[in-house]
Amino acid sequence: MAHRQTQTEWENEMCMQILDVIRSELYLDFRYLDMALSALTFSANEQIHTLATDGTYLFFSREQILRVFRNNPLFLDRAYLHSVLHCIFRHLWMRGNREPVLWNLACDIAVESMIDGLLIRALRVPPSPARRELYQRIQGKIPVITAQAVYAFLQKEGLTEG
């Protein structure tokens, strides 16, 4: 008698298939990132609310993947690429003695700025007025937007952890 899947097993399998589709979609626009896009191993983790990575695994919430895929599948493409770019830019390993919350914010700003600058229709989300204003302020002071430069900018602006 064949094993009958539990609901959790079925959801896990569907999420893995969705993530495979997302990776394939990203391959089409970013062929040169083939190794990076396939480097992370998918792992369900219901403690998170979005995609996350430790550089080895791409953690996902089954509930969120299934819900977002139904309602806004392109968001998942962007979130997947966002996680991969954190690894490419080594953000996970370069924090050093920096304030963790401020460093994570600086890394997210740097990655999102890069994604917003790409001319890829599938990733295009019009930046909010607040995001556009922040980009303008940063670009006026930083010639190249990197996590390190954004971190220094945020410190000068008086933003601190908490």
Image (spheres, helix red, strand yellow):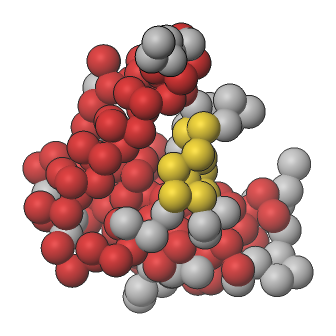
Asked whether the viewer can see residue 109, the reply is: no
- Residue ID at (59%, 58%): 57
Report the number of discs.
Answer: 0
Depicted 153 relative to depicted 53: above or below: below
Q: Residue visible at 85% across and 56% down?
A: 161
Q: Give the residue displayed 58% in from the left and 46% down from the top.
A: 43
Vertical placement of 124 versus 158: above or below? above
Horizontal arrangement in the rendering, residue 42 relative to residue 139 (left or right): right
Residue 15 drawn above or below residue 25: above
Front residue (pair 159, 24)? 24
Residue 82 coordinates in the image, percent (x, y)? 43, 58
Q: Is residue 106 left or right of residue 95?
A: left
Can the viewer see residue 118 in this picture? yes
Residue 50: where, in percent of width, then height?
Answer: 56, 37
What residue is rendered at 62% in x and 75% in y?
Answer: 91
* Horizontal side, residue 3 vs residue 126: left or right: right
- Vertical relation: 48 (above or below) 42: above
Residue sticking out furthest to the bottom: 143
Residue 60 on image: x %, y %: 56, 39
Quarter holding residue 18 = top left
Question: Which of 7 and 43 lies nearest the eye of the viewer?
Answer: 7
32 left or right of 78 in image: left
Residue 107: quarter of image: bottom right
Query: Which residue in the rendered view is the most extreme toward the front?
Result: 1
